[in-house]
Image: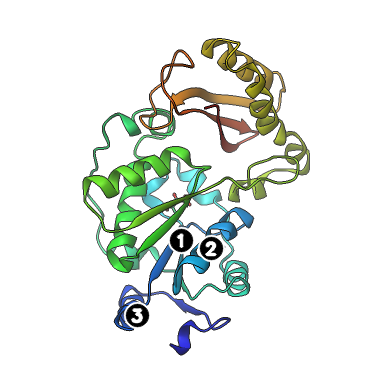
Amino acid sequence: MQNFLKGIMKTITTVSELQKEICAAKAEGKTVGLVPTMGALHNGHISLVKRCVGENDVAVVSVFVNPTQFNDPNDLRNYPRNLDADVELLRQNDCSIVFAPSVEEMYPEPDTRTFDFGMLDKVMEGAFRPGHFNGVAQIVSKLFDIVKPHRAYFGEKDFQQLAIIREMVRQFSIPVEIVGCPIVRETDRLAMSSRNARLTPEQREIAPFIAQTLNNSLTFVPSKKVSEVIEWVTGKVNALPELRVEYFQIVDGNTLQPVTCWDETEYIVGCITVFCGDVRLIDNIRYK
Ligand code: PAF
């Protein structure tokens, strides 16, 4: 189909037009991949887009700052937005369709649905950002409903989000393959994030210390106790006056529940959230 030839990208703002394009592509037997984003795109997003382009005939990237997942109005207000640059970057990376709807288009009426993810959303981000994952589930389920993608791509940086989306797909038997993609890091190891754009030059110098500390903590496993590693990482990061750890937890990678010893389970991940000034950064590391 001509629309989906390399370099010819459509920017669509309405659900009906998007559905028309996708129906036409599916009628021709094409596979559709979806990369949900909130824009302010960086190389982490682009790694998802490249994978999506490589594995599907049609790559749809949504750019939508979803208000229902922000529990802090300041965070929503300050979230970086740059649609023109995003569209250009997506064009250069062979995206087929950019879906950039308005808030009214996505929420013609308030979304009152509440999701229950058991213990998965009671910990970490779920505990510190009440309602956040309910908002994520609202928007991602809407996007899945509209696009009905064969595959959808999410970054492992948002480790808990990925686990919750997998759980949502399982609970509602949504016919989509969820593809988790590795964290993309700057050369100094800072995990790529749209929020990095808000760091001052001084904060940008210091922020990589978070990932470097996580990486150094690998050498203590399994000789130090889980509690000692938590204390060490938290202490090291908090020792810098510009950084403040909100939480650092070492959890079972499937259940997201804290572990107390290294042989408790086969899959163990350390998840951290740190304020660098007023910029909230998250990262994680796989221990096992
Ligand atoms: O990870 C994000 O950017 C957002 O939470 C998502 C998945 C696009 C939903 O708004």
Judge whether residue 40 can be spotted in this image. Answer: no
Whole-percent x and y of residue 163?
A: 38, 40
Q: Which mark is residue 49?
A: 2
Q: Earlier in the sequence, mark 3 or mark 2?
A: 3
Q: Is residue 204 above or below residue 67?
A: above
Helix or strand or loop: what does disc 3 sit on? helix
Real-space Cα separation, disc 3 to disc 1, in angstroms: 18 Å
Whole-percent x and y of residue 240?
A: 72, 23
Give the image quarter of residue 80.
bottom right
Mark 2 in CB contact with mark 1 (< 8 angstroms) = yes
What residue is shown with label 1?
35
Real-space Cα separation, disc 2 to disc 1, in angstroms: 7 Å
Q: Which mark is residue 260?
A: none
Whole-percent x and y of residue 202?
A: 78, 38
Whole-percent x and y of residue 261?
A: 47, 13
Q: How many marks?
A: 3
Helix or strand or loop: what does disc 2 sit on? helix
Mark 3 in CB contact with mark 1 (< 8 angstroms) = no
Q: Nearer the viewer, mark 3 or mark 2?
A: 2
What residue is shown with label 3?
17
